[in-house]
Amino acid sequence: MLKILVSIWFLVMALGLNAQSFEIINTPDANITGFIGEIIKVPLHLKNNSDKTTTLVVRRVSAEIGSSQKNYYCIDDNCLDAKVDDYIIKLNPGETISSVNIALEAGLTHAISELRYVVFNKSNPADLYELNMNFSVDERTEKPTIYSSSAITLKDVYPNPIIDNAFVDYQISDDEIKAKIVIHNILGNIIETYPLLSSENKLKIRADGLNAGIYFYTLYIDNEGVITRKLVVKK
């Protein structure tokens, strides 16, 4: 009888040692979709299941991403440097946090990207979860309308940020109006002016003559500015 009790005790202890001290409540999907120009955030909801304070390590194992993409951690809205591979978290007994996000800056072109992470207990590295995430980044099929009137409809510029060229879709229904897009820098200096022709419905904005940085584009109707949006140029 004593041998049986001892055997049961060792079995319980072994199960306790192998049991995971934490869990990821919302295991991320293996396949994630997003759009050009977005920052795609994948939240990690981490829970300490033990009765002791636990230190967890979120580690990037590999990142196969596009040349215009970046991968980093965001803690709520505070994003860390892309060079940071490990993020360390301390969880009190029974505590759950949802502030940690794995972020992919989707870039400027269509891309298929793969990220691999592990989350493990620092005091017991065998106590871990593996995360494999595949990202498919596409261009939005329908750009949001940023200005609409009886005379003209203007869609948002894309892609934004841009490296080489950006495009603006528009529709002019009144041939009498004079419409144009004006690019200016943060000091308000005009960099380029593009007339919007009623015979066309797409404008090409060239970025080859622009330095990397923040600019603005304004829609003018009959020489009156009606709406301004930010334009980011990357090199």
Image: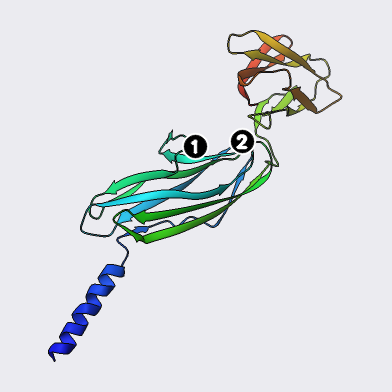
Seen at 68% across and 32% down, the residue is: 159
Seen at 28% across and 73% down, the residue is: 15
- Kindly state the secondary structure of the residue where label 1 is placed: loop
Seen at 40% across and 54% down, the residue is: 119
Above/below status of 134 relative to 197: below
Percent x, y of residue 121? 32, 56
What amino acid does circle 2 point to? Gly
What amino acid does circle 1 point to? Ala
Q: Can you see residue 129?
A: yes
Work out whether residue 216 or residue 101 is closer to the camera in this orientation and state it.
101
Percent x, y of residue 87? 38, 44
Which residue is tagged 1? 82
Of mark 1 and mark 2, the one earlier in the sequence is 2
Above/below status of 69 relative to 215: below
Which residue is tagged 2? 37
Q: In which quarter of the image is residue 235?
A: top right
Cα gap from disc 1 to disc 2, whole angstroms: 17 Å
In the displayed structure image, the side of residue 15 where residue 59 appears, left or right? right
